[in-house]
Image (cartoon, grey):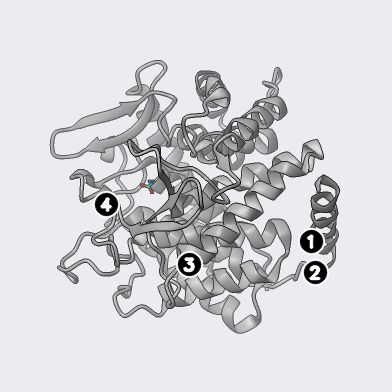
Amino acid sequence: MKNQWLLIFSFALIMSCTTTKTARFAKDKTLLTAIDQNFKDAVEQYKFLAKNLPADKFPKTYFPKTDTYEFSNSEWWCSGFYPGSLIYLYEHTKDPFLQTEAERILKVLEKEKNNTTTHDLGFMMFCSFGNAKDLLKSANPMDYKSILLQSAKSLSTRFAPSVGCIKSWDSRNPKDFLVIIDNMMNLELLFWATRVSGDSSFYKIAVTHANTTMKHHFRPDFSSYHVINYDKETGGVQQKKTAQGYADGSAWARGQAWGLYGYTVMFRETHDKQYLEQAHNIARFLLNHPNLPADKIPFWDFNAPDIPNALRDASAASITASALLELATYSDAKMASNYFKTAETMLKSLSNPTYKAAFEKNGGFLIQHGVGHIPQKTEVDVPLTYGDYYYLEAMRRYKNLPNR
Ligand code: GLY
C-alpha cells in the first residue's frame, strides 16, 4: 500500500515538472507602485504592533473603539500568521528588525510542533516555519525541517481512517467527528512532509481528507457548509451545519475562501485535474454571486439577511485574492484573466483607506474590517492577523506573476 502511494506521489511530481503552464499577466503599474508603498508602510505598522506585544504573546486582534488589544498564547490557531507576516515583510525589505523579531517569536511558537489537540497545525507551523525555511536566511537557523516534520506527525494523529478526515474540533459526544472546511488549509504541510521524508502516509492523509471533504462539504452550486458532523465509527454524515456563518445552509464568506485556496493547493501538489475543476467551480460560485459587491470585498456571509448593509469581511477578500492569483496560473486565458482582474480589484480595494489602516491606527494591524465570529459576537468588524497575512501574500503573488 505504501508503495502504491509513493508511485502516485512520484507521478504527481513528474507531472508537476511537465505540465506547468506559463500564463502571463498585464499587471497594473499603479497597483505595483502601491504594493511597494504598502510593504514599506506595513513594516512601520508591524514595528508599532511589535512594540505593543507582550513577550511570549501573539497578536490576535485590536478593538479601535476602546483602543485595546487581544493577544494569544502560541496554541491559538492563528499564532503562525504574525511570524509569517514578518517573514514576508523581511523578504521584501530586508529590514533586520523583522528578522530578529521573526526569530524571537518562532522560538516561542516551536513547542506547538507537539500539539495534537488542534487541526490547525498547518496554519500555525507552515505559514511560519514553512516561510522561514524558504525566506529567512539566519546565521544560526532553527532546525525548520525537523520542526515541520514533527508538526506533520502531530497533525496526522488526528486522522481517522473510518471517516477519511482529520478531526477539526473535539465534541462532548463521543460519536461525533467534526470537520470544518477551514481544515483544507492544513494539508499543504502534509504534502511538504512527504516530499522531504519520502513517507507517503502524509500525502495519503491529505488526499483522503480532500476527497472526503469534496464529497460531503459542497452543495450542488459549489458553495460549502462550514461543519460536517460525521459518525466517528461508520463515517456516515450525521449533520451539515454552520458555526461561524449566518445559517446552516448559508455561504459563510471565509469558509468559501478557505475551500477555494485549499483545492487550488490540492491541484498544485497532486496535479490531479479533479481538484482544479473543484477550485474553478468554487471560484465560479464566488465570482458570479449577485451579492459580491463591486469592490469585491465580500459581505461576511453571502446570505447575510441585511445585505447590502451587512458587515464586510476583509479577511475573506485577502484569502480569496491570494488563492485566485495562484489559480489564474493554472487556468486558460479567459479564466486566468477573470481571476486576475478580480484579485486586482480586491487588492486595490484593500489598499485604499477604507480597509488599509493609517500609520499607528488599527493597533498596528494592516487591514481593517474583518469579521471573526458573528454568531458568538467575537471579533466583529476588527483587524484579524490572518487578514494581514493573506493580504501580504496576495501582494507578493501579484508582484511575482510573470509579466505579459
Ligand atoms: N475557524 C477559522 C476561521 O475563523 O476562519
Residues under numbered marks 2 and 1 in contact, where contact means CB atoms less than 8 Å apart: yes
Residues under numbered marks 1 and 3 in contact, where contact means CB atoms less than 8 Å apart: no
Disc number lying in front (2 or 3): 2
Task: Name the residue rendered at 29%, 49% in the picture.
Answer: 368
Q: Which residue is mark 3?
A: 343
Label number found at residue 19: 2
Mark nearer the N terminus (2 vs 4) = 2
Q: CA distance from mark 2 to mark 3?
A: 24 Å
Residues under numbered marks 4 and 1 in contact, where contact means CB atoms less than 8 Å apart: no
**Residue 306: horizontal and vertical position, in percent?**
15, 68
Q: Quadrant of residue 277?
A: bottom right
Label 2 SS: loop
Q: Which residue is mark 1?
A: 16
**Residue 20: horizontal and vertical position, in percent?**
77, 67
Disc number lying in front (2 or 4): 2
**Residue 53: horizontal and vertical position, in percent?**
35, 23
Q: Which residue is mark 4?
A: 369
**Residue 105: horizontal and vertical position, in percent?**
50, 22
Badge 3, how many Cα within 10 Å: few under 14, some, many 20+? Answer: many
Q: Amino acid at mark 1?
A: Ser
Q: CA distance from mark 2 to mark 1?
A: 6 Å
Badge 1, how many Cα within 10 Å: few under 14, some, many 20+? Answer: some
Mark nearer the N terminus (2 vs 3) = 2
Label 3 SS: helix
